Image (cartoon, grey):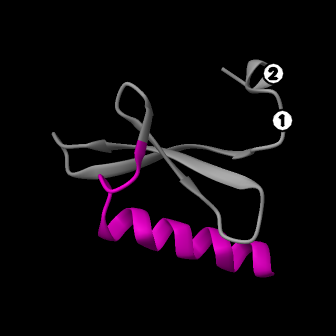
């Protein structure tokens, strides 16, 4: 339950300030999930004014093994 609340909080931050987070690849931005070793990766689509969350990934894993 705490994990889901932490994800909801991160999503709310992305909605409020979609461009406030670190760019990690092109236009993809990363926000870390508080208290858990996860991060959300998102893109702000200016054309349709939408935010797409691409992944929620564990940060202690080797990025080369992440799904493409």
Query: For residue 68, what is the image quadrant?
Result: top right
Q: Position of residue 22 (x, y in %)?
A: 42, 45
Span shown in magenta: 1-22
| Disc 2 versus disc 1: nearer the observer | 1
**Would you say 62 lies left or right of 45 here?**
right
How many labels sit on residues? Answer: 2
Tell me which residue sits at (72%, 73%) in the image: 4
* Residues at circles 2 and 1 in contact by the CB criterion of under 8 Å: yes
Membership of 18 in magenta stretch: yes
**Would you say 24 lies left or right of 60 here?**
left
SS for dot 2: helix
Report which residue position mark 1 lands on. 61
**Would you say 39 lies left or right of 65 here?**
left
Return the mark for residue 35.
none
- For label 2, count other residues whose C-alpha is less than 10 Å away and answer few (under 14), some (14-19) or many (20+): few
Q: Position of residue 39 (x, y in %)?
A: 64, 51
Main SS, magenta region, reads: helix
Q: Which corner quadrant holds the N terminus?
A: bottom right
Mark 2 and mark 1: span between their CA atoms?
8 Å
Tell me which residue sits at (64%, 63%) in the image: 33
Q: Position of residue 62 (x, y in %)?
A: 81, 27
Report which residue position mark 2 lands on. 65
Q: Is residue 3 above or below residue 66?
A: below
Q: Is residue 17 above or below residue 49?
A: below
Membership of 52 in magenta stretch: no
**Would you say 14 lies left or right of 47 here?**
right
Q: Is 54 or 34 nearer to us in this picture? A: 34
């Amino acid at each position: 339950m705490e994990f889901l609340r932490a994800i909801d909080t991160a999503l709310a931050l992305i909605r409020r300030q979609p461009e406030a987070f670190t760019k990690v690849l092109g236009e993809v931005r990363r926000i870390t999930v508080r208290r858990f070793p996860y991060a959300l990766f998102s893109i702000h689509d200016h054309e349709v004014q939408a935010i797409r969350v691409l992944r929620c990934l564990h940060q202690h894993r080797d990025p080369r093994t992440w799904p493409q």
